[in-house]
Image (cartoon, rainbow, N blue to C red):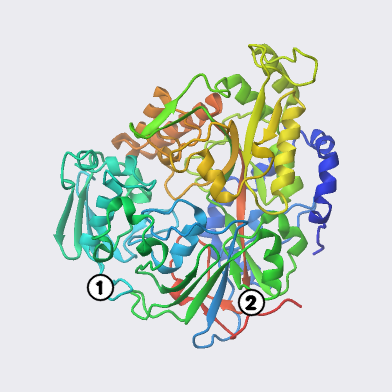
Amino acid sequence: MKKISFSKALFALMLILLLALAACSGGSDDEGSDDSGSDDTGTEEGTDEGSDEGAEDEGGDEEPAEEDDGLYSVEDFAPSKTNEGEAIEGGTLNFGLVSSSAFEGTLNWNFYAGAPDAEILAWFDESLLGNDEKYRYNNDGAATYEISDDNRTYTFTIKDNVNWHDGEPVTAEDWAYSYEVIGHPEYTGVRYGSDFTNIEGMEAYHNGEADSISGIEIVDEKTLKITFIKATPSLLTGSIWPYAMPKHVFQDIPVAEMQESAAVRENPIGMGPFKVETITPGESVTYVKNEDYWQGEPKLDGVTLKVINPNTVVQALETGEVDMVDSFPTDQYPDNAEMSNVEFLGMTDLYYAYIGFKLGSWDAEAGEVATDDSMKMSDVNLRRAMWYAVDNNAVAENFYNGLRWAADTLIAPSHPEFRDESIEAPTYDPEEAKKILDEAGYEDTDGDGMRENPEGEELVINYAAMEGGDVAEPLANYYMQAWEAVGLNVQLLDGRLQEFNAFYDRVGRTGEDDPAVDIYQGAWGVGFDVDPRGLYGRDAMFNFSRYSSEENDQLLEDGVSEEAFDVEYRQQVYSDWQQLMVDEVPVFPTLYSAVLAPVNNRVQNYSIAVDWNAPHEISVTAEEPVVAE
C-alpha cells in the first residue's frame, strides 16, 4: 500500500484550502461517504461481535486497505492485537501518553478531570464493576450486584480477594466513603451531579443537613446497598459510581485538601494490576506488578508510562522508545501506515469534537449554570450561521483522510441504538450562513469586510483552541478563515493556541469561566452511558457552554425516567433531544473519530475493545521492543 505524503504539504495546503473546500462543499454526494463508514451496522461490528471476525479476517499480517479515493475507514481495523511468537516470563512494557502538555497528576478517580490522568489511573486502579460490549455493568468485575424488583435498590458484593496495594482489603466502607467524599459540602472535584443527587439522602448530606447518606447502607464488610430515588436505565451504563476510595488512607485528610494531598499527587494507591512506584510530575510514571491482584498475578514485571509529544510519536514508536500509545494522531496515519514494527488497532471512538459557544457562566453557590441572554454569542442565528460556514466533510478528508468524519448530532456513532441519523443538521453552505446573518442584522456597516453586531458595534469573536499535533494550528486557521469568508471576525484567544490544562481551566473546568472566551473548540469522550446530562445538564460543571432551557431539562429528565426502560420511548426522547440541540446550537459537533492504537509486535494479549479488562494478561515476546526496519 502506498503512503500518502499529506502531512508534508499540510501548511502549504492551508493556502489553498478554502478553494479546495468549495469544491468539496456539503450537500453533495460526499456526505454519503461519511455515513458509509459510520452507519449503525458498521459501528456495531467495529466494537462488538464483529471485532473477533475482523481480527480473523485481518490475521494480523495485512495492513488495512486503502480506499480508491485515498481515504481510509475505521472498518479496516480490528480492536485486538494479533499474538505472534512465544511470550517470555516477566518483562516491562513502555506506554506512551500522547499529549502536547504535561499531565496534571490528579491521580484519584474522585478528583481527576482530564483524559491524561485517566490513562495513568487505569494502570493502577479500576472500577469495581465490569462491563460488556454494550457498555452495561456485569458481574465479571471485582464486585457483583443484585437489583430489587422496583429497580431502585442495588446490592453490591465485593469479592473476597480484592485488596488495596498496601494489603488492606477493599471494603464496602471504602466504596461508601467514595460517595461520602464526592457528596461532601467541601468536595473540590467535578463529579458531583445528577448521578449522585439521585441517591436517597444525598442532597441533605451535601447541604450539611445530615451527617450520613440515608440511601447508602453498609451491610457487612463486603456488602454495600444503595437506594436511588428514581429507577433509571442509565444506572447500569454509568450512573452508578463504581470506584472505591481507601478510607484508611484518606480519613484523616480534610475533604477540601484531598485533591492536592500526597495521597492523590505523590503516593496514590489503587486495587489494579500494577502499583505506582515513582512519579516524575507531569512527565512519567513507573509501575511494578501487583502480585496480589484479584484476577491473578500480572504477566509483566512492570510498566513505564511517559508523555510523548504528538510531533515525536512516530519516532518514539519506530525506535521502540514506547511499545504502544493511548491514541495515535489519525492525521499522521497515512504517512506511517506501513510502520513495520507495530500493528495498528482501531475502532470507532466514544468521542466527538465540537465548537462550543459561551452562553453564560457557572453559579457555584447554586451549583448550576447561569445562562445569560446578553452574552456575545446568545443569538442562535449567529451560532447557526457559524455552523453553516464550515465544511466538516472536507476537514475530515483533507486533515484526517477519512479516519475522522463529519458529525451531525451530539450522540456519536459509538451509540447507534440512540443516534438518530434522520436528523437534518446544517451542512456547509456559506451563502445560507450569509443570508442568516443578514436577516439577523449582522451587517458590514463600515465597509471593512467584517460584520458588526445588530447594534452596529464592532464584533470580534474570541476563539479558544487547544495545542496538539501538526493539525491543531492549521485546523484552527481553517475555521477562522471559513468564518471570515462569511464576514465574521474570529480571532484566536491571546493570539495563540492554548495548552491543554490552561484551555480547560479557561473554559470552566474549575467553575471559573474566563469572560474573554466567546467560542471554543473542544472534544468529549462521551463515556459508556448515552445519557448526556453530565455534559449538558443544568447542574453539570462540564456544561461549558452554560446552556440551559426548560425543554432541555425536561428531555434530559425523561431520558432517565422509569418510562425510559422502554427502549423505543428512550430512543424517541434522545431523538427529540438531538433535534433540540440542532435547533438551539449551544454547541455544534464537528467530527466523529476512529481511535487508532499502534502496538509493538512483541506485545501480546492487548485490546482496546470496550469490554476488555485484562491488562494483567499482557505479555511480551522479547526483553526489548521491536525496532522499525
Measure the alpha-carbon separation of dots 1 and 2.
37 Å
- What x and y, as percent, mark residue 219? 14, 59
- Whether residue 62 is visible to the viewer of this picture, yes or no, is no
Q: Amino acid at mark 2?
A: Asn
Please give the residue where the numbered disc 2 appears in the rendered image: 601
- Disc 1, SS: loop
Q: Decide: few, some or many residues near mark 2? Use Cα within 10 Å; few <14, some 14-19, many ≥20.
A: many
Quadrant of res 329: bottom right
Q: Position of residue 433 (x, y in %)?
A: 70, 22
Q: Quadrant of residue 602?
A: bottom right
Name of the residue lying farthest toward the left: 219
- Disc 1: which residue: 168
Q: Quadrant of the N terminus?
A: bottom right
Viewer-nearest residue: 253 or 601: 253
Q: Secondary structure at mark 2?
A: loop
In the picture, measured across the screen, residue 587 lies left or right of residue 274, that is right
Residue at x 56%, y 52% (from the top left corner): 349
Residue, x 82% and y 63% (percent of image)?
2
Q: Vertical placement of 457 versus 178: above or below?
A: above
Q: Nearer the viewer, residue 376 or 10?
A: 376
Q: Is residue 342 left or right of residue 12?
A: left
Q: Which quadrant holds the C terminus?
A: bottom right
Q: What's the residue at 71%, 59% (across, down)?
A: 333
Q: Amino acid at mark 1?
A: Glu
Is 306 or 629 nearer to us in this picture? 306
In the displayed structure, 322 sits above or below 403; it is below
Q: Is residue 221 left or right of residue 241?
A: left
> Picture coordinates of residue 40 (x, y %)?
55, 46
